[in-house]
Amino acid sequence: MAKHYYKLAAIGGDVIARFDLGCFEKQEGNMNRALKHWHIAASVGMSILCIALEKCTPVDMQQKKTMAELYKHIQLIWMR
């Protein structure tokens, strides 16, 4: 039930809700969806995302590629 409200908040632009949706998806085993939510959160500069990414263990090459892209994106944000 709570996940529904996080979705509504994320659609409304709440970055923390977007990050939390990624956490929900990871807990449910939907790693690709989690990475997508975290990518959106990273695109607006959410630095706590690094903590989540360090705890995240990619399963396949596509996820590893996505993780590498997220790290690059975060580095670019921090260089601004």
Image (cartoon, rainbow, N blue to C red):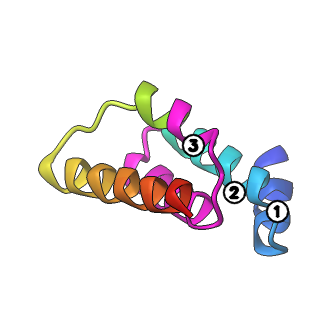
Quarter in which the C terminus is drawn: bottom right
Q: Which residue is mark 2?
A: 18
User: CA gap, disc 2 to disc 3?
Assistant: 11 Å
**Mark 3 or mark 2, which is nearer the start of the sequence?**
2
Q: Which x, y percent locates residue 72?
A: 35, 57
Residue at the top extreme of this rendering: 55
**Mark 2: few/some/many CA within 10 Å (<14, 14-19, 20+):** many
46 or 60, which lies in front? 46
- From which residue to which does the magenta span run? 28-51
**Mark 1: few/some/many CA within 10 Å (<14, 14-19, 20+):** some
Does 73 sit left or right of 58 as displayed? Answer: right
User: CA gap, disc 1 to disc 3?
Assistant: 14 Å
Q: Secondary structure at mark 1?
A: loop
Does 58 sit left or right of 7 as displayed? Answer: left
Q: Is 74 covered by the magenta stretch?
A: no
Residue 49 image label? 3
Q: What residue is shown at x 54% (from left), y 30% (from top)? A: 51
Residue at the left extreme of this rendering: 61
Q: Secondary structure at mark 2?
A: helix
Q: Which x, y percent locates residue 30?
A: 43, 47
Residue at the front extreme of this rendering: 80
**Mark 3 or mark 1, which is nearer the start of the sequence?**
1
Q: Which residue is mark 1?
A: 14
Q: Disc 2 marks which amino acid? A: Arg
Q: Secondary structure at mark 3?
A: helix
Q: Which x, y percent locates residue 68?
A: 27, 51
Q: Disc 3 marks which amino acid? A: Leu
**Mark 3: few/some/many CA within 10 Å (<14, 14-19, 20+):** some
Q: What residue is shown at x 82% (from left), y 62% (from top)? A: 14
Q: Which x, y percent locates residue 20?
A: 69, 44
